[in-house]
Amino acid sequence: MDVERSPREIAGLMVLTFTSGMVDAVGFIALGRVFCALATGNVLFLGLAVAGEPQLAVSNTATALASFATGLGLGHWLLSGMERRGRRWFRGAIGAEAVALTAASALSWGLVAEESAQLSGRHYAVVALLALAMGARAATAQRVAVPGMSTILVTTALALLFGRARTAGPGATPTVHRWRYLCAVLSIFAGAASGTLLLHVGVTAPLLVAAVLAVAVSLFGGPGTGPGPGRAPEGGPGAGAAPGPDRARGA
């Protein structure tokens, strides 16, 4: 069962969802048609590339998928280590993500957007850093465990928004939660639109904005100090952890 979350926590997750849209706009438009946050899209693209779709490349999507999986594993390892030591795991995890995003934005300085399947070594390095950061974010979102808000995917938010009746009862979704799920959908939409517009300035611009926003969330948008629910399952990559007690110590 979901519990009430602080406005600060919800706002922080909304900002992270917004930046996921920005990162994927960069990946799809400027980095050889890959998704760095929406890893399920890369699974689809990988299937199309294997089948011979000329606008997609196996190497591009495989790089993004492998980096995302690595980031997910490292994220869980980092979170567990910080939690055992009694440290502020949310701040540390999102801070580490911000470092990866900053490195990606620095590496992308002067990089020419590449819409074709042919990428340079520097393009691949930016893809790897972005997907690594998004994989780590997926692990953090699991630990925070707000249903419908994985920060990298809004499939579950859409299902919770439209899939249950408003009427009271065991299966009903409270109106306040529906607003939360709607905001998650709008956040990733707005992030994608903003990232696309910022690409007119250059590849670095949206990535730098995403890094700055991640820093802000790590400082001001973490979960509260009280106990919360266990890791709620979320559709898509980095999801599906079994419910359990949340031992969050806050940020």
Image (spheres, rainbow, N blue to C red):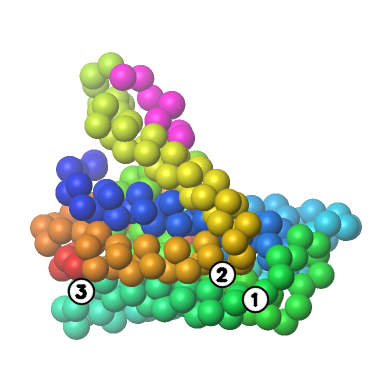
**What is the distance, in whole Å, between disc 2 and disc 1 at their CAs?**
8 Å
Indicate the amino acid at tag 1.
Gly
User: Is residue 147 found left or right of 25 in the rendered image?
Assistant: left
Tell me which numbered mark, 2 or 1, is placed earlier along the sequence.
1
Quadrant of res 38: bottom right
Question: Vertical placement of 159 versus 238: above or below?
Answer: above
Do the residues under discs 2 and 1 have CB atoms within 8 angstroms? Answer: yes
Q: Position of residue 112 (x, y in %)?
A: 71, 70
Tell me which numbered mark, 3 or 2, is placed earlier along the sequence.
3
Tell me which numbered mark, 3 or 1, is placed earlier along the sequence.
3
Residue drawn at x 24%, y 21% is 169
For label 3, the residue is 88
Q: Nearer the viewer, residue 169 or 20?
A: 20
Question: Residue pushed farthest front?
Answer: 201
Under circle 3, the secondary element is loop
Task: Report the magenta residues as a range.
Answer: 158-166
Question: Residue pushed farthest top?
Answer: 167
For label 2, the residue is 204
Question: Residue pushed farthest left?
Answer: 226
Q: Position of residue 220 (x, y in %)?
A: 22, 63
Indicate the amino acid at tag 2.
Thr
For label 1, the residue is 110
Do the residues under discs 3 and 1 have CB atoms within 8 angstroms? Answer: no
**What is the distance, in whole Å, between disc 3 and disc 2 at their CAs?**
30 Å
Please say whether residue 241 is one of the residues in the magenta stretch: no
Under circle 1, the secondary element is loop
User: Is residue 246 found left or right of 59 in the rendered image?
Assistant: left
